Amino acid sequence: MTNGFFNHDNPEARRTLARAESINATFQSVAEGFDKLPAEAEMKQGRVNRATVTGGPTAYAATLPYSPAGYVDGLRFSFKVPSTNTGACTINVNGPLGALGVKSIRRFNGTDPAPNDLTAGAIADVEYDGSVFIIVGAHGASETNAAASAAAAAASQSAAAGSASASAGSASAAAGSASAAAASQSAAAGSASAAAVSASAAAGSASAAAGSATAADQYGSAAGGAAPSVRMNWDAGTSAADPGAGKVRVNNPTVASITAIHISESDAASANLSSVFTAWGGSTNPVKGRLRIGHRLDLTKWIEADVTAVADNGTWWTITVSNPTGPGGFAAADVVAVGLSRAGDKGITSTYWGGTAGGTANALTATTGANLSSLTAGVIIGLTVGATGNSGAATLSVDGLSAIAIRKSGSALAGGELTANTDVWLQYNGTYWRLIGGAGSSGTFTATLSKSSAYTLTAADGGAVIKCTSAIPLTLLAASGAPVAWWVTISNRSTGTVTIAPAGSDTIAGAAAPWVLRSGQDVTIYRTGSSTYEALGLSMPVTDSQATWSAVNKAAGITLSNSNMTATGTSGVGSVLGTVGVSGGKRYFECRLPTAFDGVVGLARSTMSLSSAVGFGDANGWGYIADGRKVNNGTATAYGSSVSDNGVVMVAADIDAGKMWIGINNVWQGSGDPVAGANPTFTGVTGTIYPAFGDQGSGSPSGTLIVGLSSFVYAPPTGYTTFY
């Protein structure tokens, strides 16, 4: 017979005497066959396919009890991990002539190992697939079933070794008789072959048993856990206390009643997880993410919940949760995986755009494109309201889910709070949609509406700017019919006055009389009660006239005409102030100089000396002389263009910034730019400031004050209004 363990091609004929050399040759063949078997100790101790591995954490070297001539598909062995891997890693197996070459180690799904897949001190099984070594097991003492199977296999190996030993004894007895030896020789050969087969099967059984347990554990972790996940053991306690190293517990045995999860800061492999749990609580969303606890070996057991807070208690953490669900079913010491899919500004998105709303004005629908199957507290939906605003309470259905009420400040919507053709933002709080931005939400301008004829405001105008381009009457809607916190800004962009009247017996700032909004003025009117409105921007109804030159604050040598709009110097040096002073904001006026010679135009405080021309007497005036110089505190310097008769001097002041600009006939001098705030003619223009005109010589200059929007020769700079 011929095989890999025992070769004997010339059996002795029956009933013949055996020669000594034939018996010796047979013994030699039997011995050589046994030499090809693993050592007795290796078979008894289950170390037939156990390699000695060194190195790591990224490159390992393996030495087997036997020396394979090369890598073959199916080559498999186990080893004790010398050091924990930090990620992708390789292994190099020693052959009879040296190392066979570096090969990658991969997970069962073909990906590189993650850190800690091969843990120092753990037992790993790998199998060569023709290209790389696949981890078919990486396990420790927890795989008790695999250990039992390996022990049984070791016992089988031991029995096989005993059988081989018995066959050797039988061969020795054959030496006493040639005929008996020949028979014994044949039996010994058969026994040796059987022993080899038994030993090989036993080794395969041990490796397969361990690999099966580990593969089941890995599959359970991947499918039953969450990604990314940490490995833990279940603790059956429910108190708010440390569950113990590598363990996790919940605060209630009934899944629907769970509000907190208590988890060890170290996982089942003793790795510290503080940075992981810190990241789980890192989102600023009310809901940090969706947490899942899955049994690593039984996919029918799991729990999910929304995470709302994460707290460090030292060696253990508390994870506050809401909306728990799942069958649960964990028992003490069960192996579980715990993972979180984060949401919000540090994780996956929870904000979606729903496009233009469908449905009806009071029953909106939206499609996000994400095909949401459920809603989690904190989700935000943006959409455009259709052509018709709501008339009362409204609902929203997203991606075909159930319709849910829309509320503002906890109350059902009033008519007009979803303005037609505007964008709105809604946030789901677990019970209803909260209106948090856009039309109808607090503090958001939604549109600018131009009006040129008498108009009565509606609830849908809430949050809008009403720009009046003509002198028209406006009537507020009855406060009892306006939404809570309804408001509107009214801007008079006409040359006349706009009146704002409350409805019925309603009041504005405690008065039933209409308010008067003069040219260039703005006011914000807002509802404060069922019959009351308040106003911002104007403290009382406006009744005063626009500024003129003052008949009181002027030098004796200045005469007034043209309803005090024109001042003329008649007998030497002196100045006149306007009747209106302002202490803040951006203001603009013009002064036409019918007679320009020796005329000075500018701004001044009321404390300026009126016996001097503007800017000449002290630091309280800032003037521009018709000959092209600027002057302040008695110092005049060359600056810009001169002004001819009937030329227009433009004056702009940003009093909050203390800056002033001079323009001549629509050209800002010194490259000034009042809109950008650049290159001012003067700085330090602060306090209560008045328009000013003066005569600084022997001539008789005249200046006509222009302060009405309809009278301006040139357009005021953007953002500037007049003196009134």
Image (tube, helix red, strand yellow):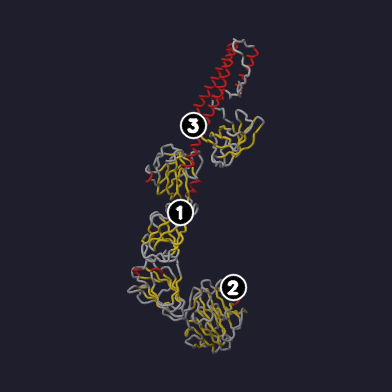
- The image quadrant of residue 31 is top right
Q: Sequence order check: which comes first, mark 1 or mark 3?
A: 3
Q: Which amino acid does label 1 sit on?
A: Asn
Task: Check disc 3 and give the amino acid type.
Answer: Ala
Quote the CA–CA distance across marks 1 and 3.
Answer: 44 Å
Number of residues whose C-alpha sits closer than 10 Å to that of mark 3, classed few (under 14), some (14–19) or many (20 or more): many
Residue 21 rendering spot, x and y as whole percentages: 65, 13
Element on which disc 1 rests: loop
Q: Where is residue 288 in the image (x, y as percent from the top left)?
A: 46, 51
Cβ atoms under marks 1 and 3 closer than 8 Å: no
Label drawn at residue 586: none
Q: Closer to us: mark 3 or mark 2?
A: 3
Residue 373, can we see it?
yes
Q: Which of marks 1 and 3 is in front?
A: 1
Amino acid tagged 2: Asn
Question: Which residue lies under the disc numbered 2?
Answer: 679
Q: Nearer the viewer, residue 373 or 321?
A: 373
CB under 8 Å between discs 3 and 2: no
Helix, strand or loop at disc 3? helix
Q: Residues within 10 Å of mark 1 (few under 14, many from 20)?
A: few
Q: Residue at x 37, y 43 (%)?
A: 254
Dividing the picture into quarters, in which one does residue 505 lie?
Answer: bottom left
The residue closer to the viewer here, 295 or 177, is 177
- Residue at 35% x, 75% y is 512
Badge 3 is on which residue? 146
Could you tell whether 160 is left or right of 256 in the image? right
- The residue tagged 1 is 371
Q: What element carries label 2?
A: loop
| Precedes in sequence: disc 1 or disc 2 | 1
